């Protein structure tokens, strides 16, 4: 089974590409969804976070108050390390479980949608790293237009993420999403063929 790490900056088109790959038959694992799941209300993960950071990181509904927790950890590297020490092993375990399920179901390609793959140096975990790429200006427009996020906020997110060159340097394959949705569909069709060719060659 081929393990694909899919990444790209904000608004690059990762979700669009991973949905298309799922339609072709890939199993898709969403890293952000797992990171939320392991600290849902009632989980040991949330209990561990509250034990470390106190009840003040809880929202009135009993869930994690992410903006509040963000304020605490991003002001202090040690606190961020403490949070990561709780969350990362839980995410790793859940990812391994989902991986085993994918193996058991017989799929040939598992796609991990990992927004911060390059930032966190996670490339070696995958057989193939696929980067979805579009110029910064195009991404700003798409996110602003489609999600109503102020342009300056999108630009700030882009500045906080890995730059385009760093991402492209980490890529085994690049999906150019600077064009139309139709062009993207054609590129994903070619990507799928390429991934299946790798499976047949026995790359993994
Ligand atoms: P994020 O990192 O913010 O979650 P993402 O990388 O998953 O974003 P998508 O959600 O797939 O990106 O795409 C961002 C927005 O741009 C969506 O509204 C999507 O419909 C739109 N979009 C994606 N590709 C194109 C395209 N080629 N042309 C026009 N709009 C596009």
Image (tube, rainbow, N blue to C red):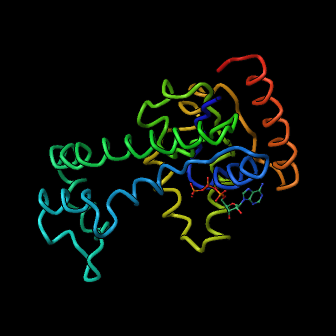
Quadrant occupied by the C terminus = top right
**Which residue ends up furthest to the front in the rendered image?**
104
- The residue that appears at 31% across and 66% down in the rendered structure is 66
Q: Quadrant of ligand 1?
A: bottom right
Q: Is residue 170 above or below residue 62?
A: above
Tell whether 4 sits left or right of 153.
Answer: right
Q: Is residue 178 above or below residue 170?
A: below
Quadrant occupied by the N terminus = top right
Residue 165 in the image: state x and y as whole percent.
58, 31
- The residue that appears at 57% across and 42% down in the rendered structure is 112
Which is more toward the observer, 95 or 49?
95
Q: Is residue 120 above or below residue 59?
A: above
Residue 8 in the image: state x and y as whole percent.
59, 43
Which is more toward the observer, 100 or 168?
100
- The residue that appears at 85% across and 41% down in the rendered structure is 189
Which is more toward the observer, 101 or 93?
101
Residue 190 in the image: state x and y as whole percent.
85, 36
Residue 25 in the image: state x and y as whole percent.
75, 46
Quarter residue 104 falls in = top right
Q: How many marks?
A: 0
**Which residue ends up furthest to the bottom in the rendered image?**
60
Quarter residue 105 falls in = top right
Tell whether 61 sits left or right of 30.
Answer: left
């Amino acid at each position: 089974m081929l393990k694909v790490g899919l990444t790209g900056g904000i608004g690059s088109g990762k979700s669009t590409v991973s949905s298309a790959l799922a339609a072709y038959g890939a199993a898709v694992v969403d890293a952000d969804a797992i990171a939320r799941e392991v600290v849902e209300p009632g989980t040991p993960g949330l209990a561990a976070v509250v034990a470390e950071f106190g009840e003040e990181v809880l929202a009135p509904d009993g869930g994690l108050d992410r903006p509040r927790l963000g304020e605490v950890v991003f002001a202090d590297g040690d606190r961020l390390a403490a949070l990561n020490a709780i969350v990362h092993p839980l995410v790793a375990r859940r990812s391994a479980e989902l991986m085993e399920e994918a193996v058991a179901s017989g799929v040939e390609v598992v796609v991990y949608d990992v927004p911060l793959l390059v930032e966190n140096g996670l490339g070696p975990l995958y057989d193939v790293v696929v980067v979805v790429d579009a110029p910064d200006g195009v991404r700003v427009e798409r996110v602003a237009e489609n999600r109503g996020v102020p342009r300056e906020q999108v630009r700030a997110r882009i500045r906080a993420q890995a730059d385009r060159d760093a991402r492209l340097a980490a890529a085994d394959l690049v999906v150019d999403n600077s064009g139309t949705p139709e062009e993207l569909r054609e590129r994903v069709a070619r990507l799928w063929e390429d991934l299946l060719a790798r499976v047949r060659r026995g790359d993994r």
